[in-house]
Image: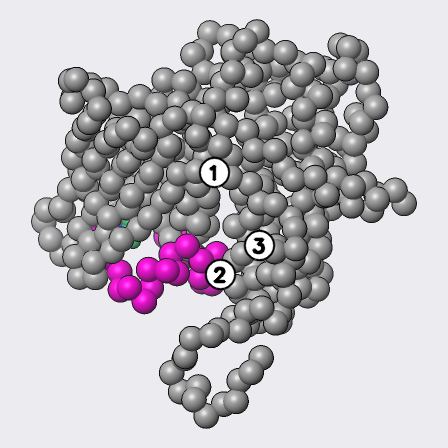
Amino acid sequence: QHFRQYLDHYSQYNPSPLSMKQFIDFGSQNACEKTSFEFLRKELPVRLANIMKEINLLPDNLLQMPSVAMVQGWYQLSFKEILAYEHADPDDAEMLENFTERLVKIRNRHTNVVETMAQGVIELKESHGIDSNTETRIQYFLDRFYMSRISIRMLINQHTLLFGSQLSQNTRHIGCIDPNCVVIDVVKDSYENAKFLCDQYYLTAPEVKITSLNATAEEKAEQIRMVYVPSHLYHILFELFKNAMRAVVEFHNEDVELPHLEVMITKGVEDVSIKMSDKGGGIPRSKSEMLFHYMYSTAPQPMRSDNGSAPLAGYGYGLPLSRLYARYFHGDLILSSVEGCGTDAFIYLKLFPSEANELLPVYNTTASKMYHSDTLISDWSSPGAGTTMSRG
Ligand code: W6P
């Protein structure tokens, strides 16, 4: 079969990260479908091949889990489907239309990848168990795998929104990018929706106090806008709000009044920073790192409430995925907790569209080494390990 050769070939190219500016420029100057097509028919196979090579390096017993095999199958099929356009004539209008429809089908095929991979990890845990080396490697893989997925969906979304059948000419958006994203609107929207869930689950929810500081503007109260993907920011904020609300309600379950959440939005020279503070009792430092562990989140199956509704937060991939969304355009998400008091969450987003580049995993020898067992032996002491001769 030629499939392996194509995989080897395309995986040798590095993915080409685009900046927010490039996405914008591309989408505004009477967007050219032909150019977009020519870029994607190479770039999508490159990004797919790069991550498929890493899937191949996963431990055998994980690869053999039915859910993981299924995800791998979707990737192989989509890879082949895009390769079919390798020699297509870019001036063929019918073919271009067909390509766009194909992208929509591919996007739909991959809708449940996150849940399905999570299921695969559960399957592995139940059938073989997961040692700490395997856990480290799966954490490393999932961060890269989901980041790759975010980036591929971004490319597909831009192409299908700009050139698809349902043209969205009337909005000020460029594809899924809002060049004038009003940050406080996304904060309020995500707060209201998290509050709705919180009210439903706990019959109460904390209020929020939002402050805004446009530090570089003449008028410090001026509305803070930036170039961003509102759906990504919403995803991050919604997740943080749910976690903060749960902490506050559960920590103050006997109290009549709940302490407010506080959100501060600041626009500096380089960054838009959003700080969300809760007085939900915080978490011990020993557990704070685990908030971003897929494995930790995967462990207990979420408790369902009496009416079957999902719990407000926790035990999901919400936080690790939110951090990936923040990092995707070279921002970040940092949690800082004070046990006994509360938690601050900081979202940092790059303001300059030319510096907000996609952050993409690259398949190379460094990446490949992460999947080989002999690299992960700790070179710091662990308590009680002194009597064991450990030389790796
Ligand atoms: C907590 C734990 C957490 C995670 C994410 C955001 C806020 C909070 N608060 O106690």
* Vertical side of 366 occupied by 133: above or below: below
Residue drawn at point x = 16 percent, y = 35 percent? 209
From the top left corner, tell me how far across and down residue 231 is, in percent.
Answer: 43, 29
Decide: few, some or many residues near mark 3? Use Cα within 10 Å; few <14, some 14-19, many ≥20.
Answer: many
Q: In the picture, which quadrant includes the C terminus?
A: bottom right
* Vertical side of 385 occupied by 265: above or below: above
- Residue, disc 2: 295
Decide: few, some or many residues near mark 2? Use Cα within 10 Å; few <14, some 14-19, many ≥20.
Answer: many
From the top left corner, tell me how far across and down residue 212 is, in percent.
Answer: 19, 28
For badge 2, the amino acid type reads: Met
Query: On residue 197, which mark appears?
Result: none
- Residue, disc 1: 328
Q: Considering only order in the chain, which callout, 3 or 2, is on the residue closer to the N terminus? A: 3
Helix, strand or loop at disc 3? helix
Q: Considering only order in the chain, which callout, 1 or 2, is on the residue closer to the N terminus? A: 2
- Residue, disc 3: 141
For badge 3, the amino acid type reads: Phe
Mark 2 → mark 1, Cα distance in angstroms? 21 Å
Q: 82 or 34: nearer the eye? A: 34
Helix, strand or loop at disc 2? helix
Residue drawn at point x = 59 percent, y = 61 percent? 370
Q: Does the residue labelled 1 lie within 8 Å of ligand 1?
A: no
Mark 1 → mark 3, Cα distance in angstroms? 16 Å
Q: Is mark 3 within 8 Å of ligand 1?
A: no
Residue extent of the magenta highlight? 280-307
For badge 1, the amino acid type reads: Tyr
